[in-house]
Image (cartoon, helix red, strand yellow):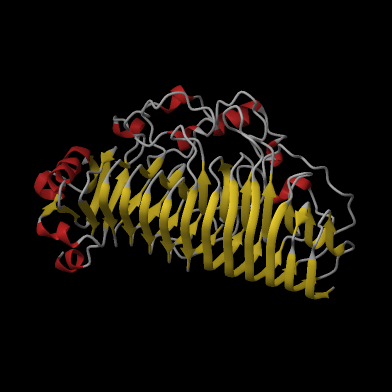
Amino acid sequence: MLAAVLALPFPAHGAQTHDVRTFGAVGDGRAIDTAAVQRAIDAAAGGGTVIVPRGRYRCFTLFLKSDMTIVLERGATIIAADPVRDGGRYALPEDRGEQLYQDFGHSHWHNSLIVGDGVARVAILGPGGIDGAGLTRDGPGARWRKQAGERPLSMQGMSAAQIAELEPDARAMEGLGNKAIALVAARDVRVEGLTIARGGHFAILATGCRGMVLRDLTIDSNRDGIDLDGVSDVLVERCRVNTPNDDAIVLKSSFALGRVLPCEDVTIRDCEVSGFDGGTLIDGTRRRTQALAPDRDRVTGRIKLGTESNGGFRRIRIERCRFTRSRGVALETVDGGVLEDVTVRDIAMTEVTTAPLFLRIGDRRRGPAGTGVGAIRGVVIEGLDARGIDHRFAATLAGLPGHSIEDVTLRDLRLRYLGGGEAVVEPEELADAYPEPSMFGPTPAWGLWCRHVRGLRVEGLHLSTAGDRRAAVRLSDCPGAKVTKLTQNV
């Protein structure tokens, strides 16, 4: 315990320690320990540390307080209780008015295992972990009246019953929990050294937060891993996130708090994301039997900006990250926000399940009246090495007529495709469709396809394929494009 206290990011919290067993927690994996753990949290509020020793603590919703730290010691696990089996319920979704422009999961925070609402100077530390066994990954979609671009085009063949299974009615969510850790309007938060399994809709959702560090996390979850929505001044470092069914680390700027909030000053570095079979990152087997995500496209597990993009993104850095058996980097704005000053560098990818790179301006405009078309400008992608890429999808930059992507630099990219593509016609614009690399079908080039891009600079692009009938590069409506040091091996 002393070592854990000495390592506290907020040293003042070490002045008082509170062992959850002192407050009545059993930790046998069967007893419901919610009340005892909450008593320890309440006692630590204002400057203390909660110690969770080895054991399995089955809980419903726990509410964090300001100026406190939770330390889960080695062998300690907080388990999300099951409302049906355990005869309890999670906190109800809070009423923040009508939520039209983002999914249910983005719009509520209290219906979670661990909740931090408006807290400050809080830490949750490992080396123990969280098992979201009793959480659900489901939740209804947005109640937006236009209902355009709500789902990937790959889901078009699904029946109403199949979609309803993934998106139940909001009333069915009462008493259920669908996030492992939910933070809203919090500041100065540290989450470090934890392992999170089966995190529900989001293993970590942070909305409108500032001053966060997420470090040395292992997340192996059944939907999204880390979602940062309208946050500022955030560092995500040395995290391993496995999410075959959805995105691993994703930045968003939704309308969840009823106002436009940009996502800004975020650094993601030295992380690993993947789409191995669920649970097999944690157990070390890294199996590869799951072929498709629930959207009926190939497994996900990527780093993405978007899809929710009302407030835009600025000053984002993604550095020295590794993608394995996942979709590639996606930078998207479809709801009116501006995506600018984004740098992606020193990225390694293997087994790329769609395009290695996807930049998209769309015209979904899911937002209040007056929401316009967004913009992408000032993006640098350099030092990206991708191997085993699905032959159907080139690295893609796709703006819209009259709304070009601007000032993008691609420098020292090495893209190795599996090969086997046939010639295809130029795809439709699909302006208001949900943005995914597969939305256009097989792209008209196999290596790099750009449409409606102004001021493109390519400085070192090395392409190879096992054989393909399409052109290696196709640029359409790309005034001022400059391509140097292009090599291709077919």
Residue 460 position by quadrant: bottom right
Task: List x then y, in percent, for residue 122.
Answer: 26, 51
* Nearest the eye: 281 or 11: 11
**Can I make out residue 33 in this image?**
yes
Quarter of the image that includes the C terminus? bottom right
153 horizontally vs 422: left or right: left
Residue 408 position by quadrant: bottom right
Task: List x then y, in percent, for residue 201.
Answer: 47, 42
Task: List x then y, in percent, for residue 444.
Answer: 85, 55
* Nearest the eye: 251 or 280: 251
Task: List x then y, in percent, for residue 345.
Answer: 58, 69
Residue drawn at x 70%, y 55% as measured from the top left: 406
* Nearest the eye: 282 or 446: 446
Quarter of the image that includes the N terminus? bottom left
483 horizontally vs 337: left or right: right
**Can I make out residue 279 in this image?**
no
Height in image: 132 above or below 1?
Answer: above
